Image (tube, rainbow, N blue to C red):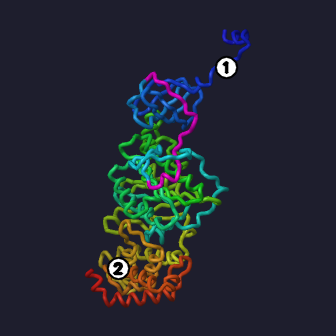
């Protein structure tokens, strides 16, 4: 009857749909709600990752479409679901999920939707960025060749990071992964790099402590904190890193350099697994959905060093269990990123902090994005540390060693001590260069191992005092692309003689 009726009235099905008000295509009805997932029927024109507004009568509740089926769509609720009931209307917003992007975000703590949570007033923004966007093309990128200085001696010398790179920080719980990220943020206070710290699934107390540390060091004003804590829904924890990088892309488009830290992607994968299981998607390995790799790759690939504008550098953090890097999420993120900073529990328990393993950590960008002077010294440092690791086991058993091996063990112990650094105290690049120069040239051989820390602190004080008194000498030393070995040797020799005479006084202080 339908074809005959259509012929009789000279009206096809397509013409009939066109004659209906377009409004009806964008209005549906809630038929079920459970566990933060709402099912909607009646919407004939809706897209994946589009937002839908549910009219509850008291307020409008925003949801995000994550499942599009033949007869219904499923959306995750981004706020509270207390007021949502079956039978309520759902209206398509006709826009994809987006967040505010403006200069007013700097110095603020916001949720993944861009709403402030720090009680410092509202954020007014005329610009919005899509949470999901395509990564920059290969043509628009340029090679990573500009160093991003973290202020950590072991990272800047052995595992250099460049602007536009993706470097993974991986290790067990309580090994100092967040401390490395916070140190990198603190070291940018004198640089022209903006920072975005994305907290996923953390306790509110931990986030407040990090914010207080950044404010005490004067770098919160150039940092945006995107907070999706453990008390927030899985939907917000899933959106948090995408919102963070969207804000970073706004500053990158203005020609600025941005550092984005995801802390951590393990909890992000867990939140996505929770959403996928609630959406009744089939589970795969370890219960994760099959597209969890794509969820992380499309996020991290948005880090780039652009030709005609700024850059976005990504430092994702992944937590392992008993150093098992063969688990699903660690293997995924390792294969996506440009290298990893591996933290060992054994080193951490020995007091070597940051507990970075020089043998297992690597930067696939290599020394292309490293300070030129530090690059010339890094090769010798890597070689001597590798030789020390080879003979370290012999020294533990108290076996008799020849003079060369004993000298190698003594030098290796002092180099290991040299790379130990306190939290939230980044070291400037010129100070790193001078200290590493003194160690590799043998000036530490006469210093006792327990006095290496005192030697370092006094050397920095002596150097800063020399720069203050003698500006010309400071100018020669502070050039980051050239090292005047004569001037540096003269300074280090004079200081070593001075320290050797008064080392007892320094040790007592």
Looking at the picture, does residue 159 appear above or below residue 201? below
Q: Horizontally, is 47 left or right of 14 in the view?
A: left
Looking at the picture, does residue 357 appear above or below residue 475? above
For the residue labelled by badge 1, is the local secondary structure a helix, a strand or a loop? helix
Q: Which of pointers 1 and 2 lies earlier in the amino acid sequence?
A: 1
The residue nearer to you, when weighing 224 against 449, is: 224
User: From the image, which quarter does the N terminus lie in?
Assistant: top right
Nearer to us of marks 1 and 2 is 1
Residue shown at the point (50%, 31%) measured from the top left: 53
Residue 428 image-quadrant placement = bottom left
Q: Percent from the top left, x then y, of residue 344?
A: 38, 63
The residue nearer to you, when weighing 112 against 172, is: 112
- Which residue bears the numbered disc 1? 19
**Residue 316 visible:** no
User: From the image, which quarter does the C terminus lie in?
Assistant: bottom left
Residue shown at the point (44%, 35%) measured from the top left: 77
Q: Horizontally, is 413 left or right of 77 in the view?
A: left
The residue nearer to you, when weighing 285 against 353, is: 353
Residue 289: which disc? none
Q: Which residues are magenta?
A: 86-107
Q: Percent from the top left, x then y, of residue 494?
A: 41, 90
- Which residue bears the numbered disc 2? 452
Q: Percent from the top left, x then y, of residue 332?
A: 49, 51
Q: Percent from the top left, x then y, of residue 238?
A: 46, 44
For the residues labelled 1 and 2, say whether their Cβ atoms are less than 8 Å apart. no
Q: Please, which residue is most extreme toward the left here?
A: 508
Q: Is residue 93 magenta?
A: yes
């Amino acid at each position: 009857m339908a074809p005959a009726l259509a012929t009789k009235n000279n009206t096809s099905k397509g013409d009939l749909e066109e004659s209906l008000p377009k409004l009806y295509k964008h209005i549906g009805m809630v038929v079920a709600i459970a566990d933060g997932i709402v099912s909607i029927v009646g919407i004939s024109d809706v897209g994946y990752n589009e937002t839908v507004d549910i009219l509850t009568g008291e307020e409008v509740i925003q949801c995000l479409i994550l499942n599009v089926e033949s007869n219904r769509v499923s959306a995750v609720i981004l706020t509270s679901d207390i007021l949502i009931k079956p039978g309520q209307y759902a209206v398509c917003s006709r826009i994809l999920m987006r967040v505010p992007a403006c200069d007013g975000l700097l110095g603020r703590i916001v949720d993944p939707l861009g709403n402030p949570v720090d009680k410092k007033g509202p954020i007014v923004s005329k610009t919005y960025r899509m949470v999901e966007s395509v990564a920059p093309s290969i043509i628009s990128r340029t090679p990573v060749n500009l160093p991003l200085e973290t202020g950590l001696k072991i990272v800047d010398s052995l595992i250099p990071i460049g602007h536009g790179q993706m470097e993974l920080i991986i290790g067990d719980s309580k090994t100092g992964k967040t401390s490395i990220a916070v140190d990198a943020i603190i070291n940018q206070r004198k640089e022209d790099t903006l920072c975005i710290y994305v907290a996923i699934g953390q306790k509110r107390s931990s986030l407040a402590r990090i914010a207080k540390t950044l404010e005490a060091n004067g770098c919160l004003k150039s940092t945006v904190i995107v907070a999706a804590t453990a008390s927030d829904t899985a939907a917000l924890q899933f959106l948090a890193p995408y919102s963070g990088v969207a804000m970073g892309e706004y500053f990158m488009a203005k020609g600025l350099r941005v550092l984005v830290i995801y802390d951590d992607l393990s909890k992000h994968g867990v939140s996505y697994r929770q959403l996928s299981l609630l959406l009744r998607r089939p589970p795969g390995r370890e219960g994760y959905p099959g597209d969890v790799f794509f969820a992380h790759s499309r996020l991290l690939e948005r880090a780039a060093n652009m030709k005609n504008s700024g850059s976005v550098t990504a430092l994702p953090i992944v937590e392992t269990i008993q150093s098992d890097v063969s688990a699903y999420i660690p293997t995924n993120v390792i294969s996506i990123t440009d290298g990893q900073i591996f933290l060992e529990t054994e080193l951490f328990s020995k007091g070597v902090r940051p507990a970075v393993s020089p043998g297992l950590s690597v930067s696939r960008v290599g020394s292309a994005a490293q300070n030129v002077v530090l690059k010339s010294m890094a090769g010798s440092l890597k070689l001597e540390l590798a030789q020390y690791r080879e003979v370290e086991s012999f020294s533990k058993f108290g076996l008799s060693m020849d003079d060369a091996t004993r000298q190698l063990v003594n030098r290796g112990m002092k180099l290991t001590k040299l790379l130990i650094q306190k939290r939230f105290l980044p070291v400037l690049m010129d100070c790193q260069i001078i200290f590493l120069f003194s160690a590799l040239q043998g000036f530490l051989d006469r210093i006792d191992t327990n006095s290496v820390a005192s030697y370092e602190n006094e050397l920095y004080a002596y150097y800063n005092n020399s720069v203050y008194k003698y500006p010309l000498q400071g100018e020669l030393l502070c050039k980051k692309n050239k090292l005047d070995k004569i001037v540096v040797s003269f300074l280090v020799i004079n200081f070593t003689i001075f320290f050797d005479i008064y080392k007892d006084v320094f040790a007592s202080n």
